[in-house]
Image: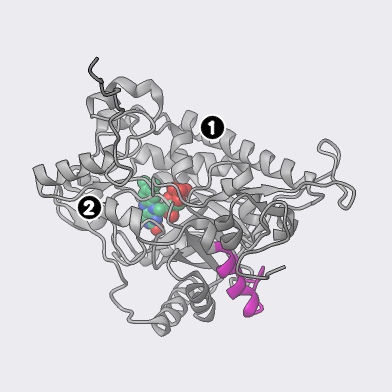
Amino acid sequence: MTYQNPPTIPRKSATFDDYTLSEIRRAAATGIYDIRGSGAKRKVPHFDDLLFLGASISRYPLEGYREKCDTTVVLGSRYAKKPITLKIPITIAGMSFGSLSAPAKEALGRGATLSGTSTTTGDGGMTEEERGHSETLVYQYLPSRYGMNPRDLRRADAIEIVVGQGAKPGGGGMLLGQKISDRVAEMRTLPKGIDQRSACRHPDWTGPDDLEIKILEIREITDWEKPIYVKIGGARPYYDTALAVKAGADVVVLDGMQGGTAATQEVFIENVGQPTLACIRPAVQALQDLGMHRKVQLIVSGGIRNGADVAKALALGADAVSIGTAALVALGDNDPRWEDEYQKLGTTAGAYDDWHEGKDPAGITTQDPVLMSRVDPIAAGRRLANYLKVMTLEAQTIARACGKNHLHNLEPEDLCALTLEAAAMAGVPLAGTNWIPGKNNS
Ligand SMILES: Cc1cc2nc3c(=O)[nH]c(=O)nc-3n(C[C@H](O)[C@H](O)[C@H](O)COP(=O)(O)O)c2cc1C
């Protein structure tokens, strides 16, 4: 009898997995790198790796239906004559007009206003749709200066100086020609249909001293009324936060590597910057070392999805969070009801990220008049408001279970971590131990 080899299972490489192989083939076929929207898709330590402990004998929980858990937050109390008070500590992040359609911008304004929170402009300037429908509007002052004018600085409720973004710290954004409509071109004073690359650094600064001068300049233009935020990507959160505070920021916005972008090189999105979870404690430490924690407010963004994420970010020391991607999903982005059209674009609902191409079937990341007419700003705004309400209720549920009558009373001591990495990054004990890796050895 001859010996027959048993069938073997073909083994695929973990290093050269299917996606990697397809990317090598794509690069070989086209000779161009991949540009896409959305944030990092690789798995990195995140809020999912933390758990709340809840109350037991040593802690006294609050009753959900009778006892209050406050959610208000005041932003800009350091120097601004008119700080902003929001009903919830969840703001809408800056997303450019150009990357987003005008109806999407209007829907963001409507949803934020219904919820008592703020929305933010973005690269490319302020649209009437968003100013008109946003009770509280933060105006971004970006390295590109596209669409920037002093009149709009004065029409805003706060100014956000963008130094960087979590998806691409050290890099500038892109807006490809397909999305440069007449209106987008006019607002940016650049030609229609031509690819635009936003600058990666401000033209008039070479270091932190220049940031201080810029903040003073903007305070003068706005009569010292408006809170001035400084937005940084998750590069060196301790030093960048400290420098922003020293330069005179009222608020620091810290965006981790999972943060969304409208269009950036994939290699950049996936390989530059630190996970959001790893950025928060160093930033809070910088504020504490300067005696500025809760005096200069910290807004954290990058991968915030639900009320638990909000509560965890706040427990680690943030004053508020900001959402981009999740807000777009609430408006209708990547909705399975457009699956047939996603398939025609070679993708599927939930994975669609070629936002730079301007072919978004949901009408959100496009300037195509037919596609964007699919967004009903009133209905989409209401969906965003519903989603923000659910997130807030979820965060309150957790806070009450930890015995807190304000979301800001959550603290690291309410948390434990499921993994060593998350314990080290968040500075909370590994579950079942009192061990914080890197902090003590007991
Ligand atoms: C479509 C889109 C456009 C964006 N445009 C800008 C922009 O113009 N300026 C900016 O500072 N950040 C921009 N961002 C980043 C967001 O402000 C924010 O930092 C990020 O989306 C937060 O992460 P999240 O999407 O996981 O919530 C953009 C993000 C998206 C998704």
**2 vs 1, front mark:** 1
> Picture coordinates of residue 35 (x, y %)?
24, 48
In the displayed structure, 338 sits above or below 199; it is above
> Picture coordinates of residue 58 (x, y %)?
88, 53
Mark 2 residue element: helix
Task: Give the magenta range.
Answer: 280-297
**Mark 1 = which residue?**
382
> Picture coordinates of residue 43 (x, y %)?
44, 47
Mark 1 residue element: helix
Viewer-proximal residue among 219 and 120: 120
**Mark 2 = which residue?**
186
Label 2 vs 1, first from the N-terminus: 2
Q: Is residue 146 left or right of residue 388?
A: left
Q: Is residue 123 visible?
A: no
- Residue most extreme to the right: 57
Q: Can residue 375 be seen in this view?
A: yes
Mark 2 crowd level (few <14, some 14–19, many ≥20, 10 Å Cα): some
Q: At 82% from the left edge and 49% from the top edge, which residue is drawn?
A: 403
